[in-house]
């Protein structure tokens, strides 16, 4: 099940990363490569999952894709254009195509704003009535009642906040969603609800989605293709089935073995 | 079951103008791992606060019932849920270790067990300089240094990735096999069922289900328990 590309029959490359490196300065003038010479292509109409343990560079890579973090070296292209330049010259245009959902819904929403203000922020240029209509449509899509429009983030649970964050992104009608551990702060029942929502979104998005996670079970739930990262490098990349059934790397096997077994085995 | 180490009877907990939890009744045997499972807001952490005697600092109080510990309070160790908030931001990692008042060999061996060898962390670093996973492992190590008789673990692996989570769970298995009782508070059902023999399911402040994990898994009686089991993500290979 993949999203249908805009023009039928044309599967084009959406993101193209060439030898991308991100270097951070750490203590005593030492340097640390969070992302270390990554070259990947993300095709349109494919759902990707970037998996790896903490410190593997997953989040940094996600932030590089959305232009939030500049790469120290290398080229980051989206639809053939340099992402950071695109952001500088036409921020609205880029944000209308690529949106990011963050890990912690307790930090990613402005505590002083109501849900309706948060959702309307991205579409301020539209006339009032259209804005309101769109906001209501989005609330329906993330299964939140309209009565929540006046609420502030503090009055909502983690799962509800993450829904608002997803609605805030969807209102821009993006082609691409980059999701950075969208459920790691939520309990399992809420996680299941958000994952179900992502499953539905996957078919609706024109471009595709990139799920960043350390949990292979979640990755296997939505992704068509897996990218395994370790220490800032791509260790393995391939269709979900191939990577999960016959992993080429020992590290991928370690990741697979670390997924808690379910259903439980009682001795 | 062996001699009980903790007995909780008709415990009612609550916050002023806030949620009320209870009545809760359960007991934990010596060397037993017991899971307290529930969604966020169910009251899991509040139970831990009460058992550690810090609930009144959190603004809550016990209105009825009691929690009887059959060991000294010094023999109870606690692993808090939020590692970043649990360490003093102005103390270095070395300062935190010195506060434990333990010999370096003991600290060294425990930190090795939690996969955080002293060589890998600078004792001069402050908590904010370590990743969430490293802090969590450090806190687990600190809780184990004094060889407790009861270990209260409040979502101990929530900020760890699956690889480290698996390592820590292995450690908890070893801790349990050494005869240390564990109250394992979590929303992660697979981990709870893997480690514990018995479990209680907390829903909206009440225990809706309690028994051996096998029994609860095979015949969940409450709708919430069924939903919890259904929500677990399964590794789909095909």
Image (tube, helix red, strand yellow):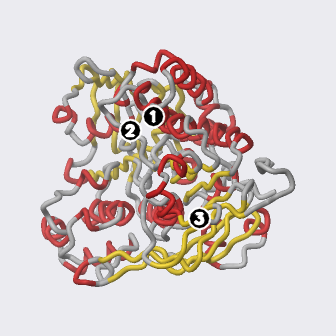
Q: Are marks 1 and 2 in contact (CB under 8 Å)?
A: yes
| Residue positioned 53% across, 25% down in the render | A135
Question: Which secondary structure, mark 2?
Answer: loop
Disc marking residue A161: 1
Q: Residues within 10 Å of mark 2 (few under 14, many from 20)?
A: many
Chain letter of the residue beneath label 3 in the structure image: A
Q: Nearer the viewer, residue B122 or A65?
A: A65
> Whole-percent x and y of residue B129?
26, 67
For the residues tagged 1 and 2, is the chain the same?
Answer: yes
Q: Residues within 10 Å of mark 1 (few under 14, many from 20)?
A: many
Marks 1 and 3 in Cβ contact (< 8 Å) = no
Task: Name the residue rendered at 45%, 45% in the picture.
Answer: A185
Q: Quadrant of the C terminus of chain A?
A: bottom right
Using residue B42 as the reference point, say whether residue B229 is left or right of it.
right
| Residue A209 percent location from the top left of the image | 64, 52
In space, the residues marked 3 and 2 are separated at their CA atoms by 30 Å
Residue B45 x %, y %: 34, 38
Q: Please tell me whether mark 3 or mark 2 is closer to you in this view.
A: 3
């Amino acid at each position: 099940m993949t999203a249908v590309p805009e023009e039928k029959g044309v599967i084009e490359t959406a993101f193209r990363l060439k030898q991308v490196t991100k270097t951070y300065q750490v203590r005593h003038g030492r340097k640390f490569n969070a992302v270390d010479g990554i070259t990947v292509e993300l095709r349109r109409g494919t759902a990707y999952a970037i998996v790896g343990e903490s410190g593997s560079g997953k989040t940094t890579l996600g932030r590089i894709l959305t232009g939030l973090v500049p790469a120290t070296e290398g080229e980051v292209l989206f639809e053939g254009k340099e992402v950071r330049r695109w952001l500088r010259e036409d921020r609205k245009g880029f944000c209308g195509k690529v949106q990011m959902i963050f890990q912690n819904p307790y930090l990613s929403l402005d505590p002083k704003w109501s849900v309706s203000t948060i959702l309307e922020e991205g579409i301020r240029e539209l006339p009032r009535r259209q804005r309101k209509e769109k906001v209501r449509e989005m609330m329906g899509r993330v299964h939140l009642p309209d009565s929540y429009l006046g609420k502030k983030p503090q009055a909502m649970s983690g799962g509800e906040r993450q829904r608002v964050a997803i609605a805030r992104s969807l209102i821009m009608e993006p082609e691409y969603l980059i999701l950075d551990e969208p459920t790691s702060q939520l309990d399992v029942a809420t996680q299941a609800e958000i994952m179900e929502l992502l499953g539905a979104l996957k078919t609706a998005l024109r471009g595709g989605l990139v799920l960043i996670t350390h949990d292979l079970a979640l990755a296997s739930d939505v992704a068509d293709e897996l990218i395994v990262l370790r220490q800032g490098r791509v260790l393995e990349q391939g269709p979900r089935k191939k990577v999960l059934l016959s992993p080429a790397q020992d590290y991928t096997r370690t990741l697979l073995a670390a997924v808690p077994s379910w259903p439980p085995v009682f001795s | 079951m062996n001699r009980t180490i903790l007995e909780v009877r008709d415990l009612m907990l609550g916050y002023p103008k806030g949620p009320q939890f209870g009545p809760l009744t359960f007991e934990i045997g010596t060397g037993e791992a017991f899971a307290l499972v529930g969604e966020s807001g169910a009251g899991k952490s509040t139970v831990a606060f009460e058992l550690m005697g810090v609930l009144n600092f959190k603004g809550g109080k016990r209105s009825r019932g009691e929690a009887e510990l059959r060991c000294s309070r010094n023999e109870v160790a606690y692993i808090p849920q939020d590692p970043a908030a649990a360490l003093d931001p102005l103390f270095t990692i070395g300062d935190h270790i010195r506060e434990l008042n333990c010999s370096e060999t003991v600290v060294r061996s425990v930190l090795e067990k939690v996969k955080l060898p002293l060589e890998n962390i600078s004792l001069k670093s402050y908590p904010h300089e370590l990743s969430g996973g490293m802090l969590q492992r450090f806190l687990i190590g600190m809780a184990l240094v004094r060889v407790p008789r009861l270990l209260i673990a409040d979502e101990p692996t929530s900020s760890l990735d699956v690889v480290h989570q698996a390592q820590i769970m292995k450690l908890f298995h070893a801790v349990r096999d050494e005869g240390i009782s564990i109250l394992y508070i979590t929303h992660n059902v697979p981990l709870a069922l893997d480690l514990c023999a018995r479990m209680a399911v907390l829903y909206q402040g009440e225990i809706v289900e309690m028994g051996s994990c096998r029994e609860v898994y095979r015949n969940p009686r409450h709708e919430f328990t069924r939903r919890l089991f259904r929500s677990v993500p399964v590794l789909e290979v095909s």
